[in-house]
């Protein structure tokens, strides 16, 4: 036999009328706690009010050379000067190599590697246009050639020789200009013909004369060994020209 349970009636309050049933059925809302950011992470909890007060109490240090929160670039050096790249100096050195009979060695006393890197990249680019990917080969031969000429000169000059490796690398790089010009011309010449070999010989002699004159004038004790230095330079630039001819 089923037992009946008496269910009290549910009354929904209407707007504007007090709820029926007295204060026992009134729904009470619990007060929500104030928002606390990062309350679950103890070491990252902070107080927004204190942070805002600390930032508004005084200006933030913006580092040296700043006025009114903005950087002052009036006293800054140009980017090329900070990197040690001087386009006017590079252009004057390139022009001095264009005339192999009157090489101006005074502009080469301050040696740099910016111009040689530019000529090396140009040489690689022209070889790439010819369908030859030789970046690693050219870079390796550049390093070996500079060390080879440095060792040869210092062995010939002995204790009187004052040619350092940095100057030697700079001279070898700038005197690569005739080979770079020939690599650009070879794009319009037949490969491996008599014309290409004759043109290569002319540009190799041009680079050899320019590099020999610079090394003899920049270093002490090289005048009496001009022939052997010229032979070493001739071997270096012949090696680079073979990359273009074949």
Image (cartoon, rainbow, N blue to C red):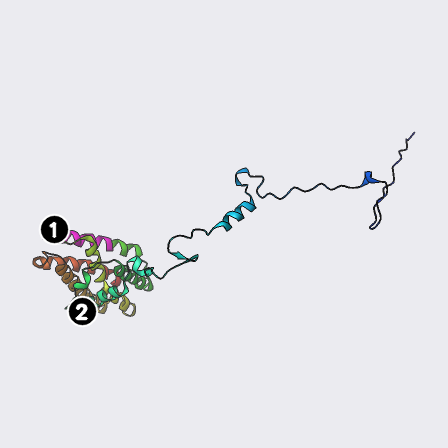
**Horizontal relation, residue 165 to residue 9: left or right:** left
* Cβ atoms under marks 2 and 1 closer than 8 Å: no
User: Of label 2 and label 1, which has the lower sequence position?
Assistant: 2
Q: Nearer the viewer, residue 40 or 150?
A: 40
Residue at 18% across, 69% down? 99
Q: Nearer the viewer, residue 159 or 234?
A: 159
Q: Residue 17 in magenta? A: no
Residue under label 1, please give it. 155
* Alpha carbon distance from label 2 to label 1: 29 Å
Residue at 28% across, 64% down? 87
Which residue range is magenta in the image? 142-155
Residue under label 2, please give it. 99
Snapshot quadrant of residue 234: bottom left
Name the dominant secondary structure of the magenta segment.
helix
Snapshot quadrant of residue 133: bottom left
**Could one spot residue 134 in this view of the protein?**
no
Snapshot quadrant of residue 195: bottom left
Q: Position of residue 180 (x, y in %)?
A: 26, 64
Q: Secondary structure at mark 2?
A: loop
Dot 2, how many residues are within 10 Å of its Cα: few (below 14), some (14-19), or many (20+)?
Answer: few
**Could one spot residue 93 in this view of the protein?**
yes
Q: Position of residue 159 (x, y in %)?
A: 10, 50
Q: Position of residue 95 (x, y in %)?
A: 22, 68
Q: Is residue 102 above or below residue 11?
A: below
Q: Is residue 5 above or below residue 241?
A: above
Q: Nearer the viewer, residue 244 or 218?
A: 218
Residue farthest to the top, as pictured: 1
């Amino acid at each position: 036999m089923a037992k009946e349970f008496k269910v009290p009636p549910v009354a929904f309050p209407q707007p504007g009328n007090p709820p029926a049933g007295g204060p026992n059925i009134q729904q009470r809302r619990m007060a929500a706690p104030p928002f606390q950011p990062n309350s679950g992470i103890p070491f990252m909890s902070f107080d927004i009010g204190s942070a805002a007060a600390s930032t508004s109490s005084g200006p933030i240090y913006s580092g040296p050379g700043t006025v009114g929160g903005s950087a002052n670039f009036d006293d800054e050096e140009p980017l090329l000067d900070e990197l040690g790249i001087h386009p006017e100096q590079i252009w004057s050195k390139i022009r001095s190599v264009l005339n192999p009979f009157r090489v101006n060695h005074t502009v080469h006393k301050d040696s740099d590697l910016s111009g040689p890197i530019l000529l090396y990249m140009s040489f690689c680019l022209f070889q790439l246009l010819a369908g030859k990917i030789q970046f690693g080969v050219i870079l390796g031969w550049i390093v070996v050639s500079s060390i080879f000429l440095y060792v040869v000169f210092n062995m010939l000059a002995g204790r009187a020789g004052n040619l350092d490796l940095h100057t030697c690398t700079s001279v070898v790089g700038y005197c690569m200009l005739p080979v770079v010009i020939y690599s650009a011309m070879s794009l319009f010449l037949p490969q491996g013909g008599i014309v290409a070999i004759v043109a290569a010989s002319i540009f190799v002699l041009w680079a050899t004369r320019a590099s020999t004159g610079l090394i003899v004038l920049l270093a002490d004790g090289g005048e009496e060994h001009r022939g052997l230095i010229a032979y070493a330079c001739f071997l270096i630039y012949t090696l680079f020209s073979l990359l273009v001819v074949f």
